[in-house]
Image: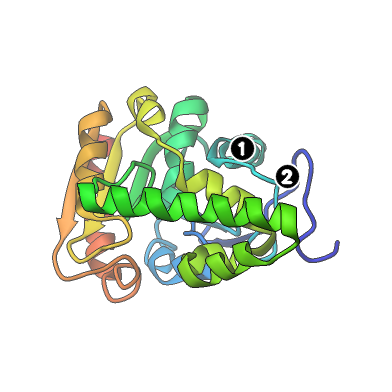
């Protein structure tokens, strides 16, 4: 299949498995990453659990979904994978964008999900200052105006605007750009409230991509949730340098699940 080709309907997700004993752990990576970004942390559980590390659609070896697919589409297609997999219900561990999908799975497919773990999980609107909101509104209007001028005059002002003001993820999204725009504008308040499984929320104190305040708000929204802020880690090094701290928190969470 040509690289970047959209897949309508359900297509199998590429996965790597580690371990063959114990409960099923499903690992979901962040935006722009692939399964290997979670390999170090997942390897710490291979002696006690069956680990499945997925490339989510559009990343690694899994073809993308239809244009503009949101996290509910990712969750629904993942559910088709898990329905055919033994060992359920599963514990889903998601980093960043993977956390969005984990929340949707808990809300939309509760029979498949025993618990979720979010590491720097995104999905709630950031709390911004009035200055930031005004600046963002003005930039949005400039972008729309550039697009309108391009449509009438055949100019390339919109491309220049994206190059100047677009985020690195937006500029690098390529064929996934419609999905990226939809995902970053999603608000998972309702799915978080609808989830009924236990949730562990791990956030680095120095995370500027998904700051701890998002985790605290998820804790308030979810019926059964525990928020932990890990000092000295950001959005990315919490998976590498902070792997053992995450492992200890997750194992304690697993022990508590046994008592329920």
Q: In the visual, does 256 lie left or right of 181?
A: left
> Which residue is at 54% across, 41% downward?
71
Label 2: element kind: loop
Label 1: element kind: helix
Considering only order in the chain, which callout, 2 or 1, is on the residue closer to the N terminus?
A: 2
Image: 89 above or below 21: above
Q: CA distance from mark 1 to mark 2?
A: 9 Å
Q: Is residue 63 at least partly visible in the picture?
A: no
Q: Give x and y (percent) for residue 258.
A: 28, 37
User: Toward the viewer: 135 or 211?
Assistant: 135
Direction bottom: furthest residue? 241
Q: Splitting the image into 4 quarters, where does residue 155 fall?
A: bottom right
Q: In the visual, does 227 lie left or right of 193?
A: left
Direction front: furthest residue? 153
> Which residue is at 54% across, 44% downward?
182
The residue that disc 1 covers is 73
Circles 1 and 2: CB distance less than 8 Å?
A: yes
Image: 108 above or below 216: above
């Amino acid at each position: 299949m040509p690289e970047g080709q959209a897949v309508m309907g359900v297509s199998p997700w590429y996965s790597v498995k580690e371990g063959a004993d114990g409960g099923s752990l499903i690992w979901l990576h962040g935006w722009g990453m692939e399964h290997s970004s979670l390999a170090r942390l997942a390897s710490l559980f291979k002696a006690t659990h069956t680990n499945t590390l997925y490339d989510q659609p559009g990343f690694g070896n899994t073809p993308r979904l239809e244009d503009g697919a949101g996290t509910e589409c990712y969750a629904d297609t993942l559910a088709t994978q898990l329905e055919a997999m033994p060992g359920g219900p599963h514990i889903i561990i998601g980093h960043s964008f993977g956390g969005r999908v984990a929340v949707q799975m808990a809300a939309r497919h509760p029979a498949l999900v025993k618990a979720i773990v979010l590491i720097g999980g995104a999905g709630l609107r950031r709390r911004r200052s009035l200055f930031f909101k005004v600046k963002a509104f003005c930039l949005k209007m400039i972008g729309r105006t550039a697009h309108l001028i391009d449509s009438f005059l055949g100019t390339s002002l919109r491309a220049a605007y994206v190059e100047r003001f677009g985020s690195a993820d937006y500029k690098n999204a390529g064929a996934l750009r419609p999905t990226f725009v939809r995902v970053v504008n999603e608000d998972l308040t309702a799915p978080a409230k609808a989830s009924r499984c236990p949730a562990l929320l791990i956030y680095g104190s120095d995370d500027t991509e998904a700051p701890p305040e998002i985790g605290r708000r998820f804790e308030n929204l979810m019926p059964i949730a525990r928020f932990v802020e890990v000092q000295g880690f950001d959005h990315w090094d919490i998976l590498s340098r902070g792997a053992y701290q995450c492992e200890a928190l997750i194992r304690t969470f697993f022990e508590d699940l046994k008592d329920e």
